[in-house]
């Protein structure tokens, strides 16, 4: 073995190292915008609303800069990035895996029953699948782009400018970029909501929320990888494993059980206004429910800064895209609006 | 009687002569320190070459370069006909004990040797026979199954010697082999070296014990501060150095005057007058003394010892 | 009978490797570390058995340890992921420290170089030794973990409950354990390669241990600094949580694959530096 070949070996090793480091560090890389036939916003929106969610498997990256307070047990809500695995079997069947560190929350819907399993305390919660709507079950709707974008389109189209702003590549799929911009009359913290729609399946692939005064998205939820096609039916069934505590969902529609929607407990919240500056007013969770899931329901009394006005007194929690006021008498007002809009709604 | 012993006489074998090891223009520097400075040396095949030099004279560095353990700053090394990148190809035929024995304390002497044996290219098949034979040869058979941890300095040295002798060698390099050995151990080393010589192997032995070298070596090389002062056959060097006469006389001053007048450099010495090798041969010196009427009790040739040679060489240079 | 073969200039590699493995497995401190590693699953298992099943007082413990309760086959995976934090890297770093720096300190490296074992073959031989230590160490944890999980913790008759709430049969459960064991070995080899590279530069084994443990701590600190998030893909330790993925169902391979790739990069770089240095090192 000559000296030269060793020099070669050394260079080779250095090359392997450089390539390896490159592979490790390189971001997914912004692909060039794929050429697609033009489509009108109306056609795109309607095709999204009529598209039937088919079977697919994918991974969803959540890049969260909402500035929400950290809630124990739901790390996805705090600022940062996380990855969620999603399987859909169509017809309301779905599975969502939310991994976090050494544990995992699993949500399974077989079309008639929803299961939620938490590996940390090994509890499984069962609820009837409400509404029979497509897409993955439960509160995953907020994180699954199919449900999230469909919802956003439907709610916002009257009060928004809707345009198709070119194309993009998301999770290796060619996609249209649907952009919803609030009309100038809307008093909102949001600047723009972008939804990337798969050009072929018309399924929303990515949701980007941009707030006023910031170039970086406040929230980006999107597939980093998606494969369409039939999935193993076993994915959409759930049998509580031995040693699991099984309980029924505590609230109607299983809405409260993850503690992510304060104000949804007991009675439906009141809507004040419409469009982008809609304010929801509800009541704080009742104490007896809160005791049951001490780490699930955030203790709102310690969050935010105190405020008061003609409407009363309370605490205000401000994030990049939304403001929440919890009044001392137990009311909660929330909206993607500045604080003033909330106080006006409360004073009404 | 020839003179001029101060000029080094490198034993540069004529081309075609068998040489076990050869270095040319060898130089090694560690930073600003010159450890070995332009050394040319041949180790003739079949010779027992003793390398002499004070501590720090570069003996070990020279041996390490010879074995490929250290890279020379400049110069070439040839070992059993192999050189450069191919040097390691000579090592299977070279047994070496360099810078003291190195073994693992948690293994027995025998297990240490078995581990060495596994790495010996020349050893094929069951290593236990050669290992036990080597242990026997260095007198360690009784302690073979004790942990190296408990060995005395002498036993460790013997085990190192055994490792160098695991397989028949063409060249054996022993760096201070008698270090830490008792007289019996020293005798054993002397016996082993003689056996190796009789078997036709070349031995390169470094030592600061001059008597040791004088007793076993056929050749010597003397190093000082990285420079080779002299190298050659031991007998020839001693003979050359032995030139000169000692004259026993009561008339010391007259004798010196007479000899200087005759052109011989004489000086006062213990027991009379010493006449170093010079232009005059012994009969002329005696004639000059008798002609000057100096009473001469005895004239004898001075018998040199390695110790004197070494002392003269190293002091001269310093 | 012994014969002398003239053609060979180095001993057969198989013989060198076998001698190295024998040497490595007889070293007292390595054996002590193996014993300590085997104690990890035993300690977890006994702890779980004493504190009771799920819903007991173990919710504050490490997440994976909590998942072991009543679910014995998770024990080897939990024990491996716990040991990967410190004890396993310490074990392979010790082996790597002894492999080159330790041999140099005992002057035995010189003997190997003079035998001669070629310098590159020496690195390969040492690699085999360290690989052996990594494999035996991981197997000690995994096998003792399976046995302890089976006997002490027990569980639903030879099945494993995943973090996703599904139940795996014995075969697949053992397959998951084997997957984590193999993945852990690769991660350890990355540590070992870097440790060997350090080992090639020094003759003080403690320097190697300090470098490896210090490196792990520094990596941990770097990973905890939010503004250095871009460094994460470069840090070997940032992929070490992926072992937990084996407890998810369906099995996500992304984390395991990317951390394995990262480990291989460390492995190649460490090996290259080691070979480069050993080609030049004075014996």
Image: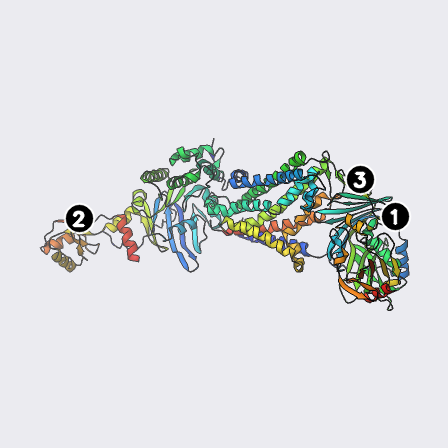
Residue C77 drawn at (x, y percent): 67, 42
Q: Which mark is residue C182?
A: none
Q: Nearer the viewer, mark 2 or mark 1?
A: 1
Chain assignment, label 1:
A
| Front in this rendered view, residue B2 or C70 | C70
* In the depicted structure, whether residue A347 falls above or below residue B215: below
The residue at which mark 2 appears reads as B300
Q: Which mark is residue A130?
A: 1
Which of the marked residues, 1 or 3, is nearer the chain's N terminus? 1
| Front in this rendered view, residue A301 or C183 | A301
Q: Quadrant of residue A345?
A: bottom right
- Element on which disc 2 rests: strand
Q: Quadrant of the C terminus of chain A?
A: bottom right
Q: Quadrant of residue C53?
A: top right
The residue at which mark 3 appears reads as A239
- Element on which disc 1 rests: loop
Residue B228 drawn at (x, y percent): 35, 54
**Distance CA(mark 1)–CA(mark 3):** 20 Å
Chain assignment, label 3:
A
- Total label count? 3
- The residue carrying pointer 3 sits among few (fewer than 14), some (14 to 19) or many (20 or more) residues within 10 Å by Cα, namely few
- The residue carrying pointer 1 sits among few (fewer than 14), some (14 to 19) or many (20 or more) residues within 10 Å by Cα, namely some
**Distance CA(mark 2)–CA(mark 1):** 127 Å
The residue under the point 76% across, 37% down is A242
Q: Are marks 2 and 1 on the same chain?
A: no
Residue C5 in sight: no
Q: Furthest-top residue in view?
A: C1
Residue B159 drawn at (x, y percent): 41, 39
Q: Are marks 1 and 3 on the same chain?
A: yes
Q: Nearer the viewer, mark 2 or mark 3?
A: 3
């Amino acid at each position: 073995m000559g000296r030269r070949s060793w020099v070669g070996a050394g260079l080779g090793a250095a090359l392997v190292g450089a390539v390896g480091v490159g592979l490790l560090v390189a971001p997914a890389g912004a692909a060039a915008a794929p050429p697609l036939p033009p489509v009108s916003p109306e056609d795109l929106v309607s095709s999204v609303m009529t598209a039937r969610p088919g079977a697919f498997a994918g991974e969803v990256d959540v890049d969260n800069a909402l500035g929400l307070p950290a809630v124990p047990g739901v790390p996805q809500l705090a600022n940062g990035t996380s990855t969620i695995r999603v399987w859909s079997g169509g017809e309301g069947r779905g599975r969502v895996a939310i991994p976090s560190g050494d544990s995992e929350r699993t949500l399974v819907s077989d079309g008639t029953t929803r299961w939620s399993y938490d590996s940390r305390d090994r509890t499984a919660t069962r609820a009837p699948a409400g509404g029979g709507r497509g897409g993955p079950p439960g509160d995953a709707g907020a994180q699954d782009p199919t449900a999230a974008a469909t919802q956003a389109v439907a709610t916002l189209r009257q009060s928004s400018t809707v345009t198709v702003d070119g194309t993009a590549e998301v999770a290796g799929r060619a996609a249209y970029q649907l952009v919803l911009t609030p009309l100038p009359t809307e008093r909102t913290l949001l600047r723009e909501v972008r939804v990337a729609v798969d050009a072929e399946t018309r399924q929303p692939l990515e949701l980007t929320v941009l707030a006023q005064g910031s170039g970086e998205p406040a929230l980006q939820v999107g597939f980093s990888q998606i494969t369409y096609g039939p999935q193993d039916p076993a994915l959409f069934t759930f049998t509580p494993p031995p040693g699991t505590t099984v309980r029924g969902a505590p609230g109607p529609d299983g809405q409260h059980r993850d503690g992510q929607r304060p104000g949804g407990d007991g009675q439906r919240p009141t809507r004040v206004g419409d469009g982008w500056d809609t304010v929801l007013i509800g009541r704080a969770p009742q104490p007896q429910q809160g005791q049951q899931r001490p780490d699930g329901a955030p203790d709102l009394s310690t969050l935010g800064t105190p405020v008061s006005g003609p409407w009363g007194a309370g605490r205000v929690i401000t994030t990049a895209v939304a403001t929440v006021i919890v009044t001392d008498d137990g009311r909660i007002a929330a909206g993607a609006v500045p604080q003033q809009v909330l106080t006006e709604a409360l004073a009404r | 009687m020839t003179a001029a012993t101060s000029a080094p006489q490198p034993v540069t074998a004529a081309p075609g002569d068998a040489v076990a090891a050869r270095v040319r223009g060898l130089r090694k520097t560690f930073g600003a320190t010159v450890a070995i400075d332009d050394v040319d040396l041949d180790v003739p095949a079949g010779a027992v070459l003793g390398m002499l030099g004070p501590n720090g004279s570069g003996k070990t560095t020279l041996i390490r370069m010879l074995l490929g353990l250290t890279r020379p700053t400049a110069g070439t090394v040839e070992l059993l006909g192999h050189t450069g990148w191919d040097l390691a190809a000579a090592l299977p035929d070279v047994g070496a004990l360099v810078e003291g024995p190195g073994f693992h304390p948690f293994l027995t002497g025998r297990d240490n040797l078995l581990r060495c044996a596994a790495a010996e290219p020349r050893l094929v098949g069951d290593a236990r026979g050669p290992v036990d034979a080597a242990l026997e040869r260095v007198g360690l058979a009784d302690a073979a199954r004790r942990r190296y941890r408990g060995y005395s300095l002498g036993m460790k040295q013997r085990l190192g010697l055994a490792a160098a002798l695991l397989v028949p060698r063409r060249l054996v390099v022993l760096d201070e082999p008698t270090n830490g050995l008792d007289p019996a151990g020293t005798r054993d080393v002397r016996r082993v070296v003689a056996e190796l010589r009789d078997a036709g192997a070349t031995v390169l032995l470094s030592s600061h014990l001059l008597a040791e070298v004088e007793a076993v070596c056929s050749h010597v090389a003397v190093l000082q501060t990285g420079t080779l002062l002299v190298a050659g056959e031991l007998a020839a060097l001693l003979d050359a150095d032995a030139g000169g006469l000692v004259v026993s006389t009561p008339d010391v001053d007259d004798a010196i005057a007479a000899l200087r007048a005759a052109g011989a450099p004489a000086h006062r010495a213990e027991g009379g007058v010493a006449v170093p090798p010079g232009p005059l041969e012994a009969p002329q010196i005696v004639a000059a003394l008798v002609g000057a009427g100096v009473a001469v009790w005895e004239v004898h040739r001075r018998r040199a010892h390695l110790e004197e040679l070494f002392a003269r060489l190293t002091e001269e240079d310093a | 009978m012994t014969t002398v073969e003239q053609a060979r200039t180095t001993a057969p590699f198989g013989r060198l490797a076998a001698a190295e493995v024998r040497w490595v497995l007889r070293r007292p401190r390595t054996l002590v570390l193996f014993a300590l590693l085997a104690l990890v699953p035993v300690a977890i298992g006994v702890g779980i058995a004493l504190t009771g099943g799920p819903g007991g007082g173990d919710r504050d413990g490490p997440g994976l340890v909590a998942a072991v309760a009543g679910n014995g086959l998770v024990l080897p995976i939990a024990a491996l992921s716990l040991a990967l934090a410190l004890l396993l890297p310490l074990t392979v770093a010790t082996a790597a420290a002894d492999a080159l720096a330790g041999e140099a300190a005992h002057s035995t490296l010189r003997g190997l170089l003079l035998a001669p074992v070629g310098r590159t073959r020496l690195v390969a031989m040492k690699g085999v030794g360290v690989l052996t230590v990594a494999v035996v160490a991981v197997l000690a944890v995994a096998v003792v973990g399976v046995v302890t999980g089976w006997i002490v913790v027990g569980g639903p008759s030879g099945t494993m409950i995943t973090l996703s709430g599904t139940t795996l049969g014995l075969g697949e459960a053992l397959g998951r354990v084997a997957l984590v064991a193999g993945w852990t070995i690769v991660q350890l080899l990355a540590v070992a390669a870097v440790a060997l590279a350090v080992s090639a530069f020094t003759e003080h084994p403690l320097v190697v241990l300090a470098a490896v443990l210090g490196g792990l701590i520094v990596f941990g600190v770097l990973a905890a600094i939010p503004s250095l998030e871009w460094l994460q893909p470069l840090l070997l330790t940032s992929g070490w949580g992926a072992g937990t993925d084996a407890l998810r169902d369906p099995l996500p391979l992304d984390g395991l694959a990317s951390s394995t790739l990262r480990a291989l990069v460390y492995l190649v770089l460490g090996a290259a530096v080691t070979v480069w240095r050993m080609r030049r090192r004075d014996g």
